[in-house]
Amino acid sequence: MTAMPASVDALPQKGSRTSDYDYELPEERIAQRPVEPRDASRLLVVDRRDGSIAHRTFRDIAELIPAGDAIVVNTTKVFRARLLGHRESGGPAEILLLRPINADHYEAMIHPGGKLRPGRVVTIAPDFRVEIVDATPRHTRIVRLHTNGDVSGTIEKYGHVPLPPYIERADESGDSARYQTVYADTVGSVAAPTAGLHFTPELLDTLRARGVKTANVLLHVGAGTFRPVSDDDPSQHVMHEEWCELTSATAKQLNAVRARGNHVWAIGTTTVRTLETATDPHGMVQPYQGETKIFLRPPVAIRGMDRLVTNFHFPKSTLIMLVAAFAGYDLTMQAYRTAVAENYRFYSYGDAMCVL
């Protein structure tokens, strides 16, 4: 028998390269403001069983979730992490607080980084100054907040809503409530878990009345969620760390739902990352508290959930790869092409997709 030539290699699987997740998106499709009311946004319904794609309104999701199923939501709350001030020279400066280190020290991203070396001070207000203390291996800074009052209260007083950079406007008064889920509870995020932005109190009441359960997890979203994948080999991407928690009560609740033959619906990619961090190889959800750097992409198998609700994500991002790990590469990219063709609104304030 003649051996195959060594030069004949197996072609890389579709979805194995970062460039496989590129798509064309007209700039006007990037939502700059949310629709009102929240649940009036559009919903692209993707069915993995037959590959069908349907167009609904988000409030119709109540018709798609059967009694006995559970929705899992991330109850993190966005804080006013964006601080605008001026340097000692008088030039403008911007500081994005990422997470607290202790009572008055934070990890932060700063601009302009080259002019704000350790020892420099940015004045936010007469009673609020930020001192640059040190640099970190992650190219962020450790800063110290100087204020006469309560640090958290001062941040809320002078800080701005940390809208994503693709929303090309200053934050407005309405963003304080609108860039926040209605069930947000625990402060710690610099970006909203955006799939949850579509739920209204009335829609949640409707789901409860229909016998749908609600379970809570917590993941504090960091600025790394916007970090692009720069290498065409996604295995070379260094994933950002985010703190998450899934309690023993939630683990017990979700395992019971699936044991009855019902489904777990993950509301957003942050919820998926929390669930998969906490799920063992046998598909059982375990309690978890700590950092996660989980990177979900094909051919990784999703074990801890059965249905997905998510917004539309950046081309070549870790989040679109996560969707493909659950929905399959071909169906995911088909859904995105359909959403672009049908004029769906994209990203944080955009429309949603439901994967059955």
Image (cartoon, rainbow, N blue to C red):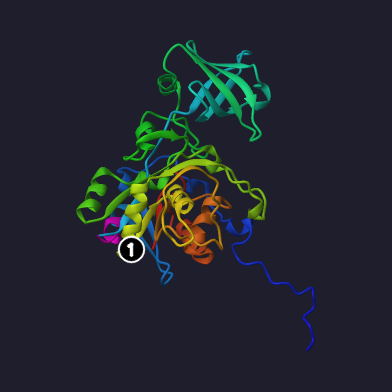
- Does 284 appear above or below 287? below
- Classify the position of the N terminus by image quarter: bottom right
Residue 109 location (% of width, % of height): 58, 30
Question: Magenta part of the protein: which range?
Answer: 61-67
Neighbor class of circle 1 (other Cα within 10 Å; few <14, some 14-19, many 20+) is few
Q: Secondary structure at mark 1?
A: helix
* x then y, percent, for residue 6: 79, 74
**From what the image shows, is residue 89 above or below residue 174?**
above
Q: Residue at x 80, y 78 (%)?
A: 5
User: Which residue is drawn at the image coordinates 55% and 41% (left, top)?
Assistant: 241
* In the image: residue 207, left or right of residue 151: left
- The answer to whether residue 46 shows anywhere in this view is yes
Amino acid found under the numbered disc labelled 1: Ala
Report x, y in % for residue 240: 57, 42
**Residue 188, image quadrant:** top left
Along the line of sight, which residue is nearer the eye, 272 or 278?
278
Whether residue 300 is in magenta: the answer is no
**Above/below status of 155 relative to 325:** above
Does residue 349 appear in the picture of this structure? Answer: no
Q: Which residue is mark 1?
A: 259
Quadrant in which residue 289 is drawn: top left
On screen, residue 100 above or below 57: above
